[in-house]
Amino acid sequence: MYGKTTRHIGSLVMLLLLICATACTPHSPLTAKTPLTVLGALEASGMPDASEAHVIISRGKHSIEEKVPVTNNSFTAAFEVPVGEWTVIVLLVDDEGMVLFQSKPQKTQITLAGPQFMELVLRPADSKVHVTINVDNYVFKHEAMRARIHFNDEIYEVTRSDSTTPLKKTIELTPGSYEFKVELYTESFRVGDRLGSGIWEVVHVSEKEELFIEWSPVTEALHITGRVEVLLPGPENVELTDMPHGVLLSWDPIPHDEVTGYFVLAQTSRLNRFQLLNTIATEEPSFLHVFESDAPSEITYIVAAVSTGGLVGYYSDPQTWSP
């Protein structure tokens, strides 16, 4: 009995050793790692309030974050990073956790070639810009449902569901000077639904600033005056006189202050419309029609006065000439 128990215990020990040999033996990870050191430094007067650096290394939805102190305006952070391409960004914060400086996202390729060092250039942290579009006094205030806000080449869109909802947008921008404009649209951002092209302005965004911009559409006053203009009567007593190589037309002038001249039209066949003989109205109550070739067998003439507004009046009674 004792011998059997000993054999059973020995078998169990061997089984445990076998399991440990297969499951507990150290093996290489799925992704190898390599050291990465991130360095940063500021000018002596660059950021005296920065107390901590947040170094963030990310790829897709995975990220690694390390918080290190800022000493004498410099910091160092070391990582063991899986092989592959990663994006690195650094934020410098003060004692209250407010971001003061930040780096632009920078990509790095981690390989097994050995330790890697990365030194980043930091810039002032983004400032918040609050843009409010005021259309209370705009003629299309109920139609303006969309807006495009331009800061240099970047475009930020804002929409609203009804005309009582404010058009507002909060944007984070790097401190600096920007060319700024706003374009208003109706039910879509198609060109045909744009209410105006917008006017470019210059906006300055300071460091550690929360800027509020209230923008209103630029409009100009339009004054419209009008008067009623009636058709001028047709000239009377149109006479035709034979001339060498042509016909001289004369008529009674129309006694009206709005008359600036007269047009003469001719028709050589009733199958055709009347053709204008003078593209510039004649001021005198006469006109010489010179034939460019042989005289036609018959020509019918009419005369009409033209007003200061360019309105052509009634035609005179047709007069027919034949050689």
Image: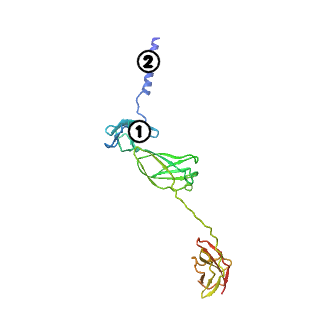
Mark 2: secondary structure: helix
The vertical placement of 312 against 172, above or below, is below
> 10 or 153: which is nearer to us?
153
Q: Report the mark closest to the observer, 2 or 1.
A: 1
Query: Could you tell me if residue 114 is visible in this image?
Result: no
Q: How many marks?
A: 2
Q: Which residue is mark 1?
A: 98
CA separation, marks 2 and 1? 65 Å
Residue 248, position as x, y percentages in the image: 61, 84
Residue 296, position as x, y percentages in the image: 64, 84
> 86 or 188: which is nearer to us?
188
Q: Which residue is mark 2?
A: 10
Residue drawn at 62 percent across, 73 percent down: 312
Residue 116, image quadrant: top left
Q: Earlier in the sequence, mark 2 or mark 1?
A: 2
Mark 1: secondary structure: loop
Check whether the beta carbons of the residues at disc 2 and disc 1 lie within 8 A of each other: no
Residue 94, position as x, y percentages in the image: 38, 38
Residue drawn at 43 percent across, 25 percent down: 20
